[in-house]
Image (cartoon, helix red, strand yellow):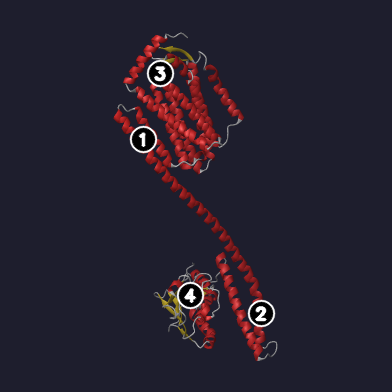
């Protein structure tokens, strides 16, 4: 090729001066340099944070080749030396081809989470080989025009690498559709965002470059260059929102970086010293406040992560405790079943001996056996409470609902406990309404157990006075209320809220030498709840007695 460099230099210098007068050169700087900075920042950041994965390396190569191409293109716009124009323009097709190939490579790895196969890499290598071999030949650039200071491209060469770009665009779209179908919900969103970003970049870059080459209107390339910044914005959002590329990036970091780049880009437009100073002060303030913002957000995120770790550990510990509690409940159930049978036998045989079935016994033996009988009865009650607890907590508590009369049940209990009251020199009163109480749907054995336990407790914790059993109809005849009141030790206000919990006992029980495990009230409350009823305690304070109140609906509703 022969060029008149003197004339071309003069002509290109005139064109450069004309473009400067139109502020076109300022626009070149603004579109090229910030975009390169953004691209390299994202590429280097991902590479540093994710050195071991192939995704980071491919993204870095993509941003690197794009930056080289933009740098060469910037020289073409700002230089008026025809030799530089021919040299740097000759690499344009090769760099663009590598951009297309690395875009495809990155898309495949991101969507499929694996490397390209050997034959796919070989196929891509074959596709790019013509560009590599034709770059240093006259089939790439055929000449130079001094009128426009532009190199003359061979149409076949340009059509080939832009055709490669179109092929890559369609291939990525196919990969995205196939990957979307088999991805989970979260990754589907990532595929959509990634595909929209990279396809927008490829379409803009391909269309603007091809039309610029076809029409000779190379200002269109600005739009293709800026589209890379938009694609990097999509990647930054993927990293912040979904931790794409296995990287943690705070939104504050991305925001501050974007602000710094935008503020710094103003230096390409300022025309005087005052504007330079103002831009410099704005940039310094942005850096300063951005640094403190990032540190504050980092501390907040670190505290949040620590709290999350603690919550996870607590969840694991709670799960272990639940398993231990279930194992304990199962153990209680097995042990109670094994204990109940021999205890029932002991109680039965002792009862037969006391009654004289096996012959006459003297008073001393009878007194001893009576104590054995009472102790075995307490043990049986304890075993029954433990069994009930295990049934309640494992969800195996069964109820047999039938019509029953509360008044008759209380009369039987009154007669049974009268001897106990007399032995302690206490009174036991029963107050029933004049009109018989209506029958209700209930499990008679379990409700009887609740009333019996409350009456036994009232007598147990009362030293003087006595106990009153009272039944009445309330709430317009829809509910039956049973009150077991005593003149015993009472219940302090601070203990009332804990009284119906497992193993909960009043603080005065040790002083009265009252036996018990604190399970009776817990079991009783669960039985009443299963009848869709309510149970609570009232007390005027220590030493002023207490009132245990049970309300049961007359019309049974499954709880």
- Numbered disc 1: secondary structure: helix
Asked whether 112 or 505 is in front, the reply is 505
3D distance between C-alphas at marks 4 and 1: 82 Å
Rendered residue at 44%/42% (across/down): 250
Q: Which residue is mark 4?
A: 440
Q: Earlier in the sequence, mark 4 or mark 3?
A: 3
Q: Earlier in the sequence, mark 1 or mark 3?
A: 3
Mark carried by residue 283: 1
Q: Are marks 2 and 4 in contact (CB under 8 Å)?
A: no
Asked whether 12 or 392 is in front, the reply is 12
- Percent of width and height locating residue 126: 57, 23
- Numbered disc 2: secondary structure: helix
Number of numbered discs overlaid on the protein picture: 4
For residue 494, which quarter of the picture? bottom left
- Say which of marks 2 and 3 sits in front: 3
Q: Are marks 1 and 3 in contact (CB under 8 Å)?
A: no
Q: Are marks 2 and 1 in contact (CB under 8 Å)?
A: no
3D distance between C-alphas at marks 2 and 3: 111 Å
- Numbered disc 3: secondary structure: loop
Mark carried by residue 79: 3
3D distance between C-alphas at marks 4 and 3: 102 Å
Rendered residue at 43%/19% (across/down): 213
Q: Are marks 4 and 1 in contact (CB under 8 Å)?
A: no
- Percent of width and height locating residue 517: 55, 74
- Percent of width and height locating residue 118: 61, 29
């Amino acid at each position: 090729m022969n060029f008149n460099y003197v004339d071309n230099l003069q002509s290109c210098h005139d064109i450069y001066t004309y473009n400067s007068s139109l502020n076109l050169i300022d626009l070149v700087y603004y579109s090229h340099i910030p975009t390169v900075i953004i691209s390299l920042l994202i590429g280097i950041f991902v590479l540093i944070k994710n050195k071991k994965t192939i995704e980071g390396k491919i993204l870095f190569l993509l941003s690197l080749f794009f930056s080289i191409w933009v740098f060469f293109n910037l020289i073409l716009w700002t230089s008026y030396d025809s030799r530089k124009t021919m040299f740097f323009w000759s690499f344009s097709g090769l760099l663009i081809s590598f951009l297309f190939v690395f875009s495809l490579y990155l898309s495949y790895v991101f969507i499929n989470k694996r490397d390209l196969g050997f034959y796919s890499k070989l196929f891509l290598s074959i596709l790019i080989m013509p560009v590599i071999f034709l770059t240093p030949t006259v089939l790439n650039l055929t000449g130079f025009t001094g009128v426009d200071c532009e190199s003359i491209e061979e149409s076949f060469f340009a059509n080939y690498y832009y055709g490669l770009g179109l092929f890559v665009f369609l291939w990525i779209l196919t990969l995205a559709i196939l990957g979307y179908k088999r991805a989970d919900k979260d990754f589907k969103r990532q595929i959509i965002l990634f595909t929209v970003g990279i396809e927008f970049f490829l379409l803009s870059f391909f269309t603007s470059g091809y039309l610029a080459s076809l029409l000779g209107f190379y200002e269109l390339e600005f739009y293709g260059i800026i589209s890379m910044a938009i694609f990097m914005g999509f990647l930054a959002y993927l990293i912040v929102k979904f931790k794409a590329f296995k990287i943690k990036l705070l939104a504050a970091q991305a925001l501050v970086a974007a602000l710094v780049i935008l503020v710094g880009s103003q230096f390409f437009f300022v025309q005087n010293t005052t504007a330079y100073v103002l831009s410099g002060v704005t940039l310094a303030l942005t850096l300063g406040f951005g640094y403190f913002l990032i540190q504050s957000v980092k501390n907040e995120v670190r505290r949040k992560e620590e709290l999350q770790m603690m919550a996870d550990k607590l969840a694991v510990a709670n799960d272990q405790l639940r398993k231990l509690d279930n194992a304990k409940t199962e153990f209680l159930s097995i042990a109670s079943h094994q204990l109940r049978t021999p205890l029932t036998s002991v109680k039965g045989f002792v009862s037969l001996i006391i009654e004289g079935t096996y012959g006459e016994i003297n008073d001393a033996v009878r007194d001893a056996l009576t104590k054995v009988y009472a102790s075995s009865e307490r043990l049986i009650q304890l075993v029954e409470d433990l069994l009930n607890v295990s049934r309640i907590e494992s969800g195996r508590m069964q109820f047999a609902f039938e019509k029953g009369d509360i008044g008759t049940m209380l009369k039987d209990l009154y007669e049974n406990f009268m001897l106990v009251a007399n032995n302690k020199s206490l009174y036991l009163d029963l107050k029933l309404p004049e009109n018989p109480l209506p029958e209700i749907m209930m499990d008679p054995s379990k409700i009887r157990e609740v009333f019996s336990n409350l009456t036994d407790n009232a007598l147990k914790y009362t030293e003087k006075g006595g106990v009153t059993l009272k039944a009445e109809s309330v709430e317009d005849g829809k509910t039956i209320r049973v009150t077991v009141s005593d003149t015993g030790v009472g219940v302090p206000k601070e203990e009332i809220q804990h009284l119906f919990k497992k193993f909960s006992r009043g603080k005065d029980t040790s002083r009265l030498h009252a036996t018990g495990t604190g399970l009776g009230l817990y079991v009783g409350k669960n039985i009443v709840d299963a009848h869709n009823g309510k149970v609570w305690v009232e007390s005027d304070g220590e030493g002023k007695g207490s009132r245990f109140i049970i309300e049961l609906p007359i019309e049974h509703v499954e709880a």
